[in-house]
Amino acid sequence: MALLAGNAASQQAPNKDKTQEQAPAIKTEDQAAATKNAPQEKQKFHSRKDRLSYAIGADFGRSLRWQRIDVNADLLVKAMRDALAGEKLLMTDDEVTTTVKTLEEERKQDYEHAKLMLSEKNKKAGEAFFAENLKKDGVVTLSSGLQYKILKQGQGKKPTLGDKVVCHYRGTLLDGTEFDSSYKRNQPATLPVKSLIKGWSEALQLMPVGSKWKLYITPQLTYGERIVGGIAPNATLIFEVELLSIQDKPGTQAAQESP
């Protein structure tokens, strides 16, 4: 997961820039079904041209099915034959362009509508969660809206905004789905505090090294209404963060060892 600001990929970490519910997607259950379908019979292709022709057709057909674009297969095949043969089409070039463009605009509107509905649903679910969570024992609520619970309190130094920290973490959604974990990679992440999502940056500066906290982060302190790496808009994210150490800054050790 990207925990860093911008489009940095995860080592990974909470990027300013995975869902309560998955982000709205064009893919449907048909995609999963299609990918599980084994070949009916082993087709013997007699040339590279034959294999390529079938592969392109299969890829195009699956794409239409995944996107739930309802077409007349007979007319689709006829249009492809006519276009490949250079014959006169049943539509003018302008009509073809306009029809396809209209479809694209309709699909974009459908996508934006689905995104908006999911965003509102996640927002309400998050607000209800935080309202109840703040009543629980041990949960601290900050003025920013960030909530945290101390699972283990360390005794080390607290990071500053300019530090890099070494930590283990696990990220989950409200429904408990785990979307990222440095523990599963068996490797802690090294992260620049100032480049992380706001919720992480704020919490880390309050955590002494050796601490393990559970963070409950509002969308305003993560990705807001954006869809990032599969995380839906207005998703509430929950992290367990274990602060292992603060990385030495270049030259620090040398300076300490000099007479």
Image: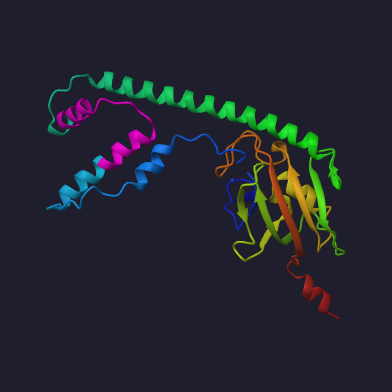
- Tell me if residue 177 comes above or below residue 226 in the rendering: below
Q: Nearer the viewer, residue 256 or 25?
A: 25
Q: Point out residue 240 in the picture as x, y percentages from the top left corner.
A: 72, 54
Question: In terms of secondary structure, what is the magenta stretch mainly?
Answer: helix
Q: Point out residue 215 in the picture as x, y percentages from the top left corner.
A: 76, 48
Does the magenta segment cover residue 243?
no
Q: Point out residue 81 in the picture as x, y percentages from the top left corner.
A: 15, 32
For residue 52, side relative to residue 233 (left or right):
left
User: Which stretch is magenta?
Assistant: 58-82
The quadrant where residue 152 appears:
bottom right
For residue 257, side relative to residue 32 (left or right):
right
Q: Point out residue 44 in the picture as x, y percentages from the top left corner.
A: 15, 53
| Residue 131 seen | yes
- Tell me if residue 76 comes above or below residue 156 in the rendering: above
Q: Residue furthest bottom?
A: 259
Q: Quadrant of the C terminus?
A: bottom right
The quadrant where residue 247 appears:
bottom right
For residue 75, side relative to residue 229 (left or right):
left
Residue depicted at x 49% and y 28%: 111
| Residue 145 seen | no
Residue depicted at x 79% and y 42%: 146
- Tell me if residue 23 comes above or below residue 171 in the rendering: above
